[in-house]
Amino acid sequence: SVPNDQVSSRRTLDTPEALETLERCYRLLASARPLRTPLSASSNKATPPNVLGRFLKKAVFDDIRFRSTKLDHDLFDVIWPAVKKLPDNRNIVQTVEEDFPGGVAAPDYYVYDVFPEFLLPLIKDLHNINGQTELADHPPSDFVNNKRLRDVSDPIIEVNVDPSEEFVLSGTIECSRNLDGFELPIKLKIGKLEAVERIITSVLLQEDFAKIIEQINPESDQKGGSYYTLNEVLEKPSEVCATLASSGLLIALCDRDEIDDSSRLHGKHWPYGRGVYVSDDKTVAIWINVHDHLRVITCTPLDSPGEIGLTFSKISYIMSYLHDKLDFVWHEKLGHLSSRPTFLGAGIRFSLIVSFPALSKDPDNIKSLCAMRGLQYRETLSPNIARISNYQSLNTTETNCFNDFATASSNLLHLEKELSMQNTAHIASMFTNIFKRKRSSIIDIDGTEDNTSQKK
């Protein structure tokens, strides 16, 4: 039986090949499931297969494997990022890891209602929400009918998490939205892709929007911005691509010929009907039809990379304007829907690239410290440089996301500063004290919290 026939295909999946593929996927995930302590998605030892294995138990799998959505997407279309063997290509691996870090993708909006037994517990885990609690209605966006955010004459938020400019190398904020009345980009035919592109660019290229860009960066002589097609970004060499990369506004992308199954990742018509608006001052990029209809990215100032308050003010003004001009898809429980389950709810992601010369000496501890503060810690190619970002954007507002991230990252950077000024023996002592303190987090990190509390 189907949970809701407004969203399902109303028929049983009975293709032998599809069912056999799902069986193989289930066996793979079951074998990856840890035998002892269940891993939270925020765990430093978690990988997509063993996180998904924890939620795709046999009873759940048997219940949902015959279902498909009204657009004919089955369970494999949801879990493929965790189970598909990707080509040994850095662009593809980076695209999948950055956009679908939980190992799940939403090919359409309906999967959230067709596979709730599997997806809802997983989504709570990805957003650090207590799995035992009922998911409340998602609060209204701060960007809707919010005069304070819309009135650019109001003072900007001033929060710098690294005023001494010692540790933060760069920062970005991304906000994701999808237009009501259109399917996700991966399923759009050429005419609809063009329609979404036309609707959004017609708003971005108006004089009113140029004024918003001008007002949020009054020190710049440049006004407004320009729109570039994704073909222009992907061509080699590409001046646009180089500019976006140097400004910290480039997202993970891959060429069509780099993956044999590009339609599963990007849709049949990639890269047609997609592009990016770049503000003249190179501090704002608005991507169109890449996984989601609209992805607004702002970066922190080059000369003050910890200045996240100014950056959040910018994205607030932009999003308030866009909310006034466009209608976005909304789900009562899940807020703003996205193809990326980590972007549900407020659909906002804060990221800082940070140098941790002291804390990185004990990788397990810094990852656990981050997880306890609701921060995701991802290592970069350099062992002492990491990307930290927020886990939760569901069941909270954009402003709460910002406040929580600002507090958590400030605390972490304050600790890094203290440790970098101390000797090794003192660092070991501080770590011991930190892990004796009472935990306020609602998550389990490989059982670390439980074990620590027992040692007290």
Image: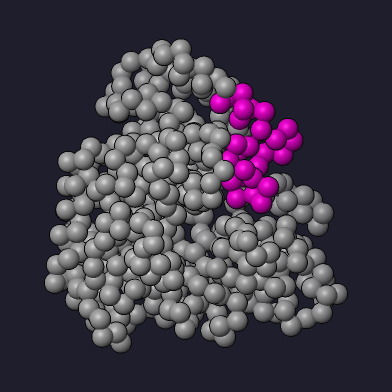
Would residue 5 appear left or right of 158 to someone viewing this image? left
Q: Residue at x 33, y 15 (%)?
A: 11
Q: Position of residue 296 (x, y in %)?
A: 33, 61
Kindly give the residue lying farthest to the right in the view shown.
Answer: 425
Q: Residue at x 15, y 59 (%)?
A: 202
Would residue 44 appear left or right of 114 to someone viewing this image? right
- Residue sitting nearer the eye, 195 or 334: 195
State which quadrant residue 302 falls in: bottom left
Q: Residue at x 43, y 35 (%)?
A: 261
Kindly give the residue lying farthest to the front in the view shown.
Answer: 237
- Residue sitting nearer the eye, 240 or 319: 240
Q: Is residue 132 above or below residue 42?
A: above
Q: Is residue 451 above or below residue 191?
A: below
Q: Residue at x 34, y 80 (%)?
A: 156
Q: Position of residue 250 (x, y in %)?
A: 41, 62
**Looking at the figure, which quarter contains the N terminus?**
top left
Residue 338 shows in the view: no
Q: Position of residue 295 (x, y in %)?
A: 34, 57
**Looking at the figure, which quarter contains the C terminus?**
bottom right
State which quadrant residue 15 falls in: top left
Magenta span contains residue 163 = no
Q: Is residue 332 above or below residue 9?
A: below
Residue 254 shows in the view: yes
Q: Which residues are magenta?
A: 25-52
Magenta span contains residue 36 = yes
